[in-house]
Amino acid sequence: MTETALAPTFQIDPTAQDALFRGARSVRAWSDEPVPEETVEAVYDLVRWGPTALNTSPLRLLQVRTPEARERLAA
């Protein structure tokens, strides 16, 4: 199968293109509000299969929920 034959399958719509590539910005501030567990799980479901440089840089996540855990992490 040629690349041309596969191209339509992998196209994303213009709204998604804008959100991902044109309008996305790095976070510069954080909220003090807790992140719901459902949101954490949904984000993980999106990123867990992403490329990780041939598994030489595997995805590592640490979920820190308490102030004490944050202090231990910062130390």
Image (cartoon, rainbow, N blue to C red):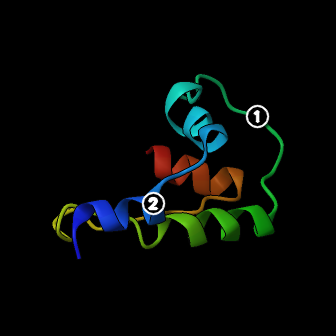
Does 34 appear above or below 26? below
Q: Is residue 34 left or right of residue 51?
A: right
Does 7 appear above or below 75? below
Look at 59% across and 32% down and name the residue there.
18
Q: Quadrant of residue 24?
A: top right
Look at 53% across and 26% down and name the residue there.
22
Is residue 51 in view?
A: no
The local crowd at label 2, few if under 14, some if 14 to 19, many if 20 or more residues have their Cα within 10 Å, is few
The three-letter amino acid code for the residue at tag 2 is: Pro
The numbered mark at residue 8 is 2
Look at 57% across and 47% down and name the residue there.
71
Q: Is residue 49 left or right of residue 3?
A: right
Depth check, mark 2 against mark 1: the one in front is 2
Percent position (x, y) of residue 65? 69, 59
Q: Is residue 71 left or right of residue 75?
A: right
The numbered mark at residue 31 is 1
- Given residues 46 and 57, the one toward you in this image is 46
Percent position (x, y) of residue 15? 66, 39
Percent position (x, y) of residue 49? 42, 73
